[in-house]
Every structure is written in C-alpha cells, then in structure tokens.
Image (cartoon, rainbow, N blue to C red):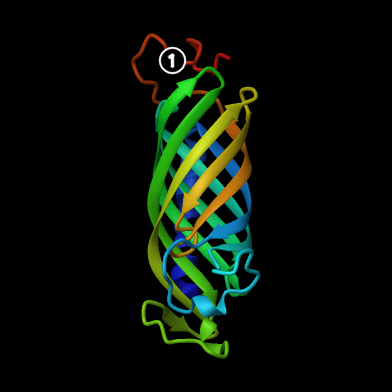
Amino acid sequence: MKSAATKIVLILLVVIGSTYAGMSQSTIQFKLAMLGVHPFDEKNSQLFENKIDANGVFITEPAIIVGYESFLLADVFAWRGMFGFVIDAASKPAIVLHLGVKQRLVQIWRNSISIGVGGNLYGRDSWSTIPGYVQDNSWNANGDWEYKWGIMAELEYALFLNDNNDITLYVLYGHQPNTFTFTVGYKYWFSSIIKHPRKCGSCPFQKEGKWNP
C-alpha cells in the first residue's frame, strides 16, 4: 500500500507543480467532517464503534481532507487531487488518496454548485486484528495496513467571499467505502485569472479575467 500511495503522491506533486508554474487558475481546499453515514449493509458492521444510533448508520468519524484543483476550462471544469486522514468506523486510522474531475453546474451571483467524481485509493490500519472480524477479500493486505480502490463522488456548494476566498459545504460519497459524509470547508484561490476562458456574454468575470461579484 505504501508504494502505491507514494506513487500517487509523487504524481500529484508533479502535476500540481507543472500546473502552478503555468499560472493556471487553481485552488487549495481544506475540509472537516465529523459524521459518517453508512446506509448500506456492510460486512463487519458489528465492529463499528462510536455509534450514534443503535443500528450503526450514523457514526462519529472525524476526517481532515486537503484538496487541490486546477481549472481546464474557465471556472467551470477542473481536475483535482485530494488527500484525507480519517478515523474510520472501527476507530482505526485511515487515509484516502483521490484523483478526479469537477464540473460546475450552477452559479447565481456569489453562490455556486458543482459536482465531482474520480478514483480513490483507500488505506486503513488492518481490521483483521480486531476480535470478531470476518474476512473481507475486497481489501489487500500490506503489513499492518490494508488497501483497496474505489470511487468518490462529491456535491459542492461554495459561497464566494472575494477573489481569493470561498466558504464551502460538501456532501461526499466514498471517502470511505459505502459511506457518506458532510463537510464544511475553506477554499483559497491561488489565481483568479482565467487561463482558458470560455466564450460567453454573462460569465461572472470582468474582461481582464477576474471574478466580478
């Protein structure tokens, strides 16, 4: 797991560095979550700790996620990468590495709604050492850790404060397998200059490429 994670981190650093060097419009994001929602039947759900309800649907699962995105078309379409640290449903340390794309759906004045999707590498401290664990072959062992691949989808609401700062709310599916979470976050724009502007007469930007509130 460590070698796969290292390769993904290196790829992210290379792409981020080359993108930033090209002065493209880009952001860094910080997200905080506390609640994990598990609406599906899951193997080893008997191991879930910190349950809020008796059925283990709602679980306290703290998470910190850092993301980077660079826009490929105006302010509407971007690729992004994310790294997150999670205390999972079994109160074990876990990580998520994500690469994907994001599309803005709606913008009304300072408010925008976007969706994102991409692939994940999940890693966690192995559950096999927990008494009562039922073998789950969807995970691959690597020393004291185990990992597997998955998909993450995201719905984002952003409130633009000014050219460089947004407040954000997110609904995430798949930051951990079969799990929803709700996050609050902050987004900082490294650059508000559009590198690849789209052709339109009503974009929320001035002619020089900066956001126009």
Horizontal side of 44 relative to 161 (left or right) equals left
Secondary element at image label 1: loop
Along the viewing direction, whichever of 181 and 96 lies nearer the viewer: 181
Kindly indicate the quadrant of the structure image that contains residue 11: bottom left
Q: Is residue 137 above or below residue 102?
A: below
Horizontal side of 139 relative to 17 (left or right) equals left
Q: Is residue 140 above or below residue 189?
A: below
Q: Residue at x 55, y 84 (%)?
A: 144
Q: Residue at x 63, y 43 (%)?
A: 184
Q: Is residue 54 above or below residue 212?
A: below
Q: Residue 101 in the image: x percent, y percent?
A: 39, 44
Kindly indicate the quadrant of the structure image that contains residue 56: bottom right
Horizontal side of 149 relative to 212 (left or right) equals left
Q: Which residue is mark 1?
A: 203
Q: Is residue 176 above or below residue 191?
A: below
Q: How many marks?
A: 1
Q: Residues within 10 Å of mark 1 (few under 14, many from 20)?
A: some
Q: Residue at x 47, y 83 (%)?
A: 142
Q: Quadrant of the C terminus?
A: top right
Q: Residue 108 in the image: x percent, y percent?
A: 49, 19
Amino acid at the residue labelled 1: Cys
Q: Residue 198 in the image: x percent, y percent?
A: 36, 20
